Image: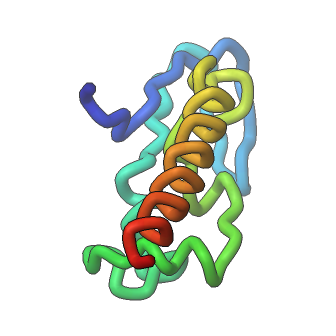
Amino acid sequence: MAQSERLIRNVKRDITFDGYFIPKHSKVRLCFWESHNSEESFPEAFLFDPDRFLENSYTSDEYAPFGLDHHRCPFAGIVFKLSTMFLENLDFSVRLHRR
């Protein structure tokens, strides 16, 4: 149940990324915590505000709760589907009990 705060990868060949040279055999840390709490992407990042997802669409550079690219969680699609079903049923249940 631990949240993935980072990915660490070994560099297999020399690369240049955004003007930075990264030599072969280096270790690269991709920081999810930092991007998910960036004030640029999420004003008031530490405020619980689920409505921010209703008003905005975020890129994987800004928000990647299930990983990136081919390192994405294999159950991400199932989680999205189950979450959608849960919220639809919750909404139906709330409306039913208001009657």
Nearer to me, 67 or 85: 85
Q: Quadrant of residue 6?
A: top left
User: In the figure, is residue 10 to the left or right of 31?
Assistant: right
Q: Residue at coordinates 42% horizontally, 81% vertically from top-left? A: 39
Q: Position of residue 53 (x, y in %)?
A: 56, 72
Q: Position of residue 87 (x, y in %)?
A: 52, 54
Q: Position of residue 3 (x, y in %)?
A: 31, 36
**Vertical position of residue 86 compared to residue 54: above or below:** above
Q: Residue at coordinates 38% horizontally, 58% vertically from top-left? A: 34
View extreme (front): residue: 99
**Vertical position of residue 3 compared to residue 20: above or below:** above
Q: Quadrant of the N terminus?
A: top left
User: In the figure, is residue 5 to the left or right of 52?
Assistant: left
Instruction: Kindly tell me whether residue 23 is visible in this rendering.
Output: no
Nearer to me, 70 or 14: 70
Nearer to me, 84 or 50: 84
Nearer to me, 89 or 82: 89
Q: Quadrant of residue 99?
A: bottom left
